[in-house]
Image (spheres, helix red, strand yellow):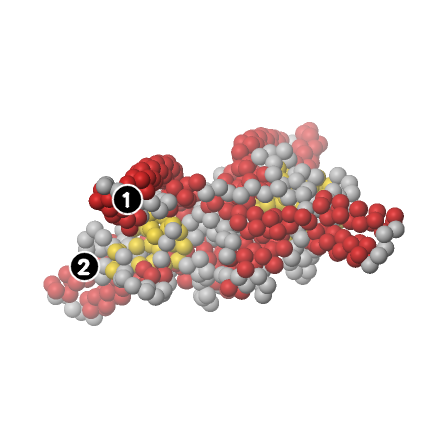
């Protein structure tokens, strides 16, 4: 739909009308800046209104500087100065810095080349460039996919206060709650509008419409049944004329779609399939994974990104690995799987099966969706081979007690690992992640990258690992698939390490938190904390740490004042030296260093005030 509006997707019929005065800004899901400029230069590169006003100001200024002081020249200069000011020319640098900071860029990042950043961060650069271009109509396709929580909150506030119009495609409930005032839902090949509705109001209205439509449908079916009963009873008798009128009434009801189940009601009653998998094999020992005093980083020639990391994952732990983008969350997952260099002790005990879904994972398979999803079920496949071999021996005539016992054991093992329900499990997982029954027979290569991510996730979940490592698993999922995944993880019998900024997923799926503190290069753990409790505990720790830091600073200042006052006195020199040693000890123990928790807690996200985008003539910016 966004492609049809912008003209990048062909329309088979109809037309899209965009007002001539409307400036349209479009952010695709797959957008990256693709620039070799610095972050700052790229972000401001499409601020064309300011650049046009700057050129006009420079040309009119030059005319006056060259000696033309006529009233006309001075009036043009004054008008150019006013236009430059109105477009925000004098605040351009400040606006660029505020947007970049809001999206998570540090001041020193703005001078780096765009090519130094990953695809996710280049998406942010593209978003910054788009916002700063001041379009009167913003088209945003999943803009929060690569944003951390702070940047998502900033973007939600930005969109809510944006003076132009916005068409947003998103499954981020917190972003939708913060920013939208109308909903259009694409369903059953058509568009249903919910005007002047917040997201929560839309859910209530959708349920009301569905109930009303279902009630009307059932009423129509009852009326049709009564009409048909009359036709069946009197169609051939003296009342045949009346029967014919009722036949026409039935045909009219059918032609008007009154006897077709309403799509709204069908959607409302659609149930997310529940999945019951056999429990994964139990590992030997209590801990499924442990890191001890590990230094973790990418380049052996550089300083480690994270130092002295210790982490234990016992059975049943569902850990959220949290922190700003670039802090090292994916690096920790890579170190656990051995894909990223680390120094120290890393232990995954026997029988622990680790399943890892990267942010950039795609299935990359030429098999069908059904075959690819089932290909990770190695436990079932091994049991199937064992059962097949045992059956073959008996079929070949070996009916000895040993052969029959092997067949009994193999059959029991195949049942225990879910072999008899394998196809049902695959269908349930694929259905939960949004695949229709007809999709299952299509080759993986016929799907986009986002859907191939879902195939990779399905294959991983069906492999029944004892430890799941999931890096932003909900990025390419719609709301119903996210709900299904949250329910799956909540009931998962193994352990999980989850990297995610999806608040709904976090609130239901985790029971412990570990926060990667990038500026300190360490890990802060909150064992036994759900997401809400973690936020409270984090605030408490931050306040406690800041109070202790302030108390230590006051103590150090008191000691230093004493030294300054009496240090030169012969009779008190010895006491002064002891106080110097106390200050040195405090500094060595880090008591005079601001605590990272407090620094993070007071991390300020600036508000942005851009000049108003240009007004379109008329109320309607776009019409399909």
Side of 410 where 610 appears, left or right: left
Side of 206 where 360 appears, left or right: right
Task: Determine the secondary structure under disc 1.
Answer: loop
Q: In which quarter of the image is residue 587?
A: top right
How many C-alpha atoms fall within 10 Å of the one at disc 2: few (<14), some, or many (≥20)?
Answer: some
Q: N-terminal of the two: label 1 or label 2? A: 2
Q: Of circles 1 and 2, which is in front?
A: 1
Q: Residue at x 23, y 41 (%)?
A: 238
The residue that label 2 is drawn on is 79
Q: Which residue is drawn at 58% across and 52% down?
A: 457
Q: Which residue is drawn at 24% across and 46% down?
A: 244
Residue 539 is situated, as x and y percent measured from the top left of the image, at 53, 33
Q: Quadrant of residue 341?
A: bottom right
How many C-alpha atoms fall within 10 Å of the one at disc 1: few (<14), some, or many (≥20)?
Answer: some
Residue 323 is situated, as x and y percent measured from the top left of the image, at 56, 45
Asked whether residue 374 appears in the rendered view, the answer is yes
Task: Determine the secondary structure under disc 2.
Answer: helix
User: Is residue 117 positioned above or below 504 on the image?
Assistant: below
Identify which residue, 468 or 69, lies in the foreground. 468
User: Is residue 376 positioned above or below 61 on the image?
Assistant: above
Q: Residue 84's mark?
A: none
The residue that label 1 is drawn on is 235
């Amino acid at each position: 739909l966004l492609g049809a509006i912008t003209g990048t997707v062909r329309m088979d019929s109809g037309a899209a009308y965009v007002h001539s005065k409307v400036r349209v800004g479009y952010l695709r899901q797959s957008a990256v800046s693709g620039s070799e400029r610095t972050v700052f230069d790229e972000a401001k590169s499409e601020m064309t209104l300011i650049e046009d006003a700057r050129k006009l100001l420079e040309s009119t200024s030059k005319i006056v500087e060259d000696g033309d002081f006529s009233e006309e020249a001075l009036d043009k200069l004054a008008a150019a100065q006013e236009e430059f000011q109105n477009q925000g020319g004098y605040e351009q640098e400040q606006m660029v810095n505020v947007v970049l900071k809001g999206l998570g860029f540090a001041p020193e990042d703005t001078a780096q080349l765009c090519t130094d950043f990953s695809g996710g961060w280049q998406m942010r650069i593209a978003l910054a460039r788009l916002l700063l271009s001041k379009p009167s109509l913003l088209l945003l396709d999943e803009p929060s996919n690569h944003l951390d929580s702070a940047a998502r909150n900033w973007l939600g506030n930005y969109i809510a206060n944006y003076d132009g119009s916005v068409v947003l495609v998103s499954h981020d409930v917190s972003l939708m709650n913060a920013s939208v005032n109308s909903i259009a839902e694409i369903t059953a090949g058509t568009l249903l509008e919910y005007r002047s509705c917040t997201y929560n109001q839309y859910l209530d209205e959708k349920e009301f419409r569905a109930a009303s439509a279902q009630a009307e449908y059932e009423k129509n079916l009852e009326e049709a049944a009564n009409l048909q009963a009359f036709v069946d009873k009197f169609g051939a008798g003296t009342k045949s004329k009346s029967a014919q009128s009722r036949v026409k009434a039935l045909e009219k009801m059918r032609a008007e779609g009154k006897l077709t189940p309403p799509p709204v009601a069908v959607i409302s009653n659609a149930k997310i399939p529940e999945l019951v998998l056999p429990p994964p094999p139990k590992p030997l020992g209590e801990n499924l994974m442990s890191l001890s005093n590990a230094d973790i980083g990418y380049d052996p020639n550089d300083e480690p990104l994270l130092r002295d990391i210790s982490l234990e994952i016992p059975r049943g732990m569902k850990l959220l690995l949290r922190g700003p983008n670039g802090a090292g969350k994916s690096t920790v997952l890579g170190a656990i799987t051995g894909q990223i260099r680390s120094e120290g002790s890393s232990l995954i005990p026997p029988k622990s099966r680790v399943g890892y879904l990267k942010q950039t994972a795609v299935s990359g398979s030429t098999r069908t969706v059904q075959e690819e999803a089932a290909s990770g079920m190695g436990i079932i496949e091994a049991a199937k081979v064992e059962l097949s071999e045992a059956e073959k021996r008996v079929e070949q005539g070996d009916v000895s007690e040993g052969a029959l016992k092997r067949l009994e054991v193999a059959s029991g093992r195949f049942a225990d690992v879910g072999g008899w329900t394998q196809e049902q499990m695959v269908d349930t997982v694929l259905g939960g992640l949004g695949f229709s029954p007809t999709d299952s027979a299509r080759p993986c290569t016929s799907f986009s990258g986002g859907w191939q991510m879902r195939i990779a996730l399905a294959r991983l979940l069906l492999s029944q690992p004892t430890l799941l490592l999931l890096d932003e698993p909900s990025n390419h999922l719609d709301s119903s698939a996210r709900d299904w995944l949250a329910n799956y993880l909540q009931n998962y019998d193994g352990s999980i390490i989850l990297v995610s900024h999806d608040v709904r997923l976090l609130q239901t799926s985790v029971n412990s938190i570990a926060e990667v503190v990038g500026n300190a290069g360490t890990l802060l753990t909150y064992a036994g904390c759900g997401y809400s409790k973690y936020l409270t505990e984090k605030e408490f720790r931050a306040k406690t740490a800041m109070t202790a830091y302030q108390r230590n600073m006051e103590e150090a200042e008191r000691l230093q004042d004493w030294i300054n006052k009496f240090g030169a006195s012969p009779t008190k020199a010895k006491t002064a030296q002891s106080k110097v040693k106390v200050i040195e000890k405090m500094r060595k123990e880090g008591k005079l260093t601001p605590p990272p928790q407090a620094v993070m807690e007071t991390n300020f996200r600036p508000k942005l005030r851009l000049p108003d985008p240009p007004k379109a003539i008329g109320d309607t910016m776009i019409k399909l």
